[in-house]
Image (cartoon, rainbow, N blue to C red):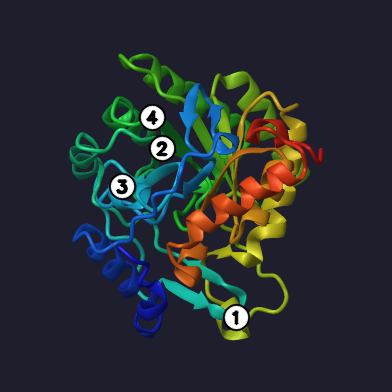
Amino acid sequence: MPDLFPLARPLLHALSPEQAHRLTIAALRAGLGPRFDLPADPILETQVFGLDFRNPVGLAAGFDKNAEVVAPMLRLGFGFVEIGSVTPRPQPGNPKPRMFRLPDQEGLINRLGFNNQGLAAVAERLARRPGRIVGANLGRNKDQTDALADYREGVRALGELVDYLVVNVSSPNTPGLRALQGRAPLSELLTGVTEARAGLRRRPPLLLKIAPDLTRQDMEDIAAVALSSGIDGLIVSNTTITRPDGLPPGLASEAGGLSGRPLFDMATSVLRDMARLTERRLPLVGVGGIASGHDAYLKIRNGASLVQLYTALAYRGPALVPAICRELAALLRRDGFSSVGEAVGADL
């Protein structure tokens, strides 16, 4: 099926971001999404966390919160898909409006607040998922005071249904969540979560997703805890609560997390720092502002073993995914690398 996004974009952007997203999910569920049959390219194949990835380009959490369109998104050419964030109980999220486009900057501000259908609904869908690599991003309910209880419940519910799990402590839209990135609470949380994983028959890799809005001490603490906790990797990074110069003043004042192109430099800087602080002993997933193969390549050269994107799809459409893969492969060959793994951390 051809890519209809150039025709559909004016219609989608005439709607609110959330309406456009719901329409996109409905179209994908109805089988109206394109399929890009990318030929396998050995230079893009990579093994991370003991998993074999067809290519290192993944769909970030947030697009398919409820695991409704895993197969259609994999057909776009993604090497892996991450669903969620999902919380134990369904919740509606924050009051609307809660998503805002920044078209000139190819960015988004959102304060969705973990709106999702809950673990039971997501687990039912994941039980029927395709055989390609799928991860699940776990959050806690807004009114839950015992965060560990929610994350443990997520591990038990989804751990045997996916290829990897993500503990998300970095969304700015759930009160108190980012406080879990502190050294003591993070150590306690990851200890409890890894214990829950140990009780599963099949133990998936466990990753931690962190914010970009971190001090040097924050990063040092996270690196130390990550290395000692037994987790398998870090996702760097979530959205930012900062507002770089040049954003429209009316939108810059909206609360929430900023994603897309304005996040690229900040997220890549934190990625580079975390690669150094973890002494490259943990695989990193680079997220934030990727909109081209060159962007993905820069993340990889700065320490990312895998990359993820989401916001750029809203502006450039699904054909972006195979375009990134082709450009990334060309850049790797141009610089004399024989694999993605060889390029990881080349600029460190």
- Tag of residue 163: 4
Secondary structure type for disc 4:
loop
What is the crowding at mark 1: few (fewer than 14 residues within 10 Å), some, or many (at least 20)?
A: few
**Disc 3 from disc 1: Cα separation:** 30 Å
**Disc 4 from disc 2: Cα separation:** 23 Å
N-terminal of the pair, mark 3 or mark 1, is 3
Task: Write down the residue under mark 1.
Answer: 104
> Dividing the picture into quarters, in which one does residue 63 lie?
bottom left
| Foreground pick, 221 / 235 | 235
Quadrant assignment for the N terminus: bottom left
Q: In the orientation shown, which residue stands out farthest toward the front?
A: 39
N-terminal of the pair, mark 4 or mark 1, is 1
**Disc 2 from disc 1: Cα separation:** 38 Å
Secondary structure type for disc 1:
helix
N-terminal of the pair, mark 2 or mark 1, is 1
Q: Would you place residue 199 above or below residue 49 in this image?
A: above
Q: Amino acid at mark 4?
A: Asp
**Disc 4 from disc 1: Cα separation:** 37 Å
Residue 24: where, in percent of width, then height?
A: 30, 67
Q: Amino acid at mark 2?
A: Ala
Secondary structure type for disc 2:
helix
Task: Write down the residue under mark 3.
Answer: 70
Secondary structure type for disc 3:
helix
- What residue is drawn where x is 36% and y is 47%? 74
Kindly report which numbered mark, 4 or 2, lies closer to the viewer in this rendering.
4
Left or right of 270? Residue 150 is: left
